[in-house]
């Protein structure tokens, strides 16, 4: 069979990288359509995935909308040329090109806040798959699984830590370090949203540096680190998860890396304008499980980060919480491979249930995929 996968952001590359590996090992043809956004192309190259680039998008607000017509034209060209049996994606590009070419599509979504994208894409998809923490119904083809999209690459059955990461970072074996991740807020679902501003960021870096070495991963490359005690995360972006797994703390105003930290057993503090009563279900659950902190006030961010770095036994406790939590979560790579072989018929795959269906009716989870 032939599968086409849209990778619009770096997170999408991670979501599908093992799926591509398994499908190709089984003799299927796979093409990834990548958008030149952030480090997406760098990751496609790093993992040696078969890809074509359908367009460029800067991290600045407004960049995407000006380029949409050209993006769709090139994406449609590549879809027609490849002629897939199933298209995977996260929104409009996948759903619309699939509809125009009469190809079944499978959307994997995890953000309730992208209402416009849901409205124009989900009715066209053969199936929509979300975490079971998702709090918004997306139609009769909406299915859920136990876990998060990050379980496709950070589930214990899939993820293998790079033991050389401390040497690569230049930190000693017992040297504590923290990572600060700053979002560019350039995606369409980020319009009107914000996070840690530059003044607060500098105060945060000063505070963290009194307790640990500090690395900054700045998606928009907007924060001037001159005169601060922090240094930029300068390794290849594919190594960021390994660095995160060894870190004592993540402080971020972004979304994906906070979930990644939770699944790696690293304490994480998330602070942006999404935090509140209407927050996304996955972050509310992770906080309930004691794996992350969702804090709107910068004062709370400072206080909580200092407490976590000063306390004893935090790493061991977070590892225990992570292990207990992931014991009930699926290997999403296995699930997506099985859905792919069923041409997007999620209803026939174990470990998936319709949105709103009680968990007690859930079938047996998908078998573990052998990636050897």
Image (spheres, rainbow, N blue to C red):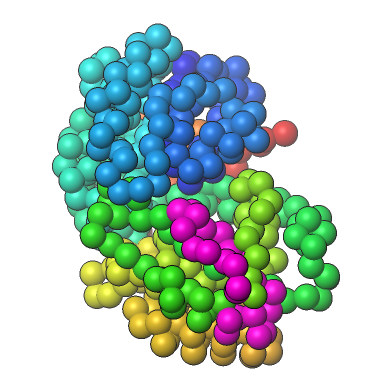
Residue 144 placed where, x, y %?
34, 50
Q: Is residue 307 above or below residue 196?
A: below
Q: What's the residue at 57%, 66% (across, down)?
A: 225
Which residue lies at the image location 48% right of the left edge and 68% below the top edge?
252
Left or right relative to 312: residue 133 = left
Q: Residue at x 43, y 76 (%)?
A: 199
Q: Quadrant of residue 111?
A: bottom left
**Residue 7 appears in view:** no
Q: Quadrant of the C terminus?
A: top right
Residue 325: image location, x then y, percent: 53, 68
Q: In terms of image quadrants, where is residue 173? A: bottom right
Q: Is residue 58 magenta?
A: no
Residue 277 vs residue 358, the one in the foreground: 277
Whether 61 is drawn above or below 348: the answer is below
Residue 360 is situated, as x and y percent measured from the top left of the image, at: 35, 59
Q: Is residue 39 visible?
A: yes
Q: Nearer the viewer, residue 64 or 347?
A: 64
Question: In the rendered structure, which segment of residues is drawn in magenta?
Answer: 206-228
- Count the numbered circles shown: 0
In reply to whether residue 224 is colored magenta, the answer given is yes
Residue 47 at x, y = what percent? 64, 34
Q: Nearer the viewer, residue 160 or 26?
A: 160
The residue at the point 66 percent across, 54 percent down is 234
Residue 260 in the figure: left or right of residue 133? right
Q: Is residue 233 above or below residue 90?
A: below
**Front residue (pair 127, 118):** 118
Query: Which residue is farthest top?
Result: 81
50, above or below 15, in the image? above
């Amino acid at each position: 069979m032939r599968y086409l996968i849209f990778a619009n952001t770096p997170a999408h590359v991670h979501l599908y990288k093992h799926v591509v590996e398994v499908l190709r090992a089984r003799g299927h043809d796979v093409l990834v359509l990548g958008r030149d956004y952030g480090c997406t192309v760098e990751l496609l190259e790093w993992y040696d995935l078969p890809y074509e680039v359908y367009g460029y998008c800067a991290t600045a607000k407004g960049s995407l909308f000006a380029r949409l017509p050209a993006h769709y034209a090139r994406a449609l060209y590549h879809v027609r040329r490849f002629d897939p049996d199933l298209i995977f994606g996260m929104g409009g590009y996948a759903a619309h090109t699939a509809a125009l070419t009469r190809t079944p599509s499978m959307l994997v979504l995890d953000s309730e806040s992208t209402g416009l994208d849901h409205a124009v894409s989900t009715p066209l998809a053969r199936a929509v798959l979300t975490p079971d923490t998702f709090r918004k119904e997306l139609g009769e083809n909406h299915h859920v699984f136990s876990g998060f999209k990050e379980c496709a690459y950070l589930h214990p059955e899939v993820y293998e830590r790079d033991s050389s990461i401390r040497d690569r970072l230049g930190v000693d074996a017992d040297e504590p370090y923290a990572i600060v991740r700053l979002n560019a807020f350039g995606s369409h679902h980020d319009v009107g949203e914000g996070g840690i501003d530059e003044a607060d960021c500098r105060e945060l870096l000063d505070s963290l540096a009194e307790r640990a070495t500090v690395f900054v991963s700045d998606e928009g490359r907007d924060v001037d680190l001159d005169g601060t005690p922090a240094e930029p995360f300068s390794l290849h972006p594919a190594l960021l998860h390994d660095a995160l797994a060894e870190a004592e703390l993540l402080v971020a105003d972004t979304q994906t890396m906070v979930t990644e930290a939770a699944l790696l057993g690293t304490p994480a503090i998330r602070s942006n304008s999404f935090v509140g009563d209407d927050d996304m279900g996955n972050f509310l659950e992770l906080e309930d499980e004691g794996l992350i902190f969702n804090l709107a006030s910068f004062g709370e961010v400072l206080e909580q980060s200092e407490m976590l770095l000063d306390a004893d036994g935090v790493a061991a406790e977070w590892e225990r919480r992570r292990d207990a939590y992931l014991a009930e979560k699926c290997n999403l790579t296995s699930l997506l491979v099985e859905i792919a072989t069923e041409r997007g018929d999620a209803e026939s795959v174990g470990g998936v249930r319709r949105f709103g269906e009680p968990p007690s009716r859930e079938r047996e989870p998908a078998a573990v995929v052998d990636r050897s």
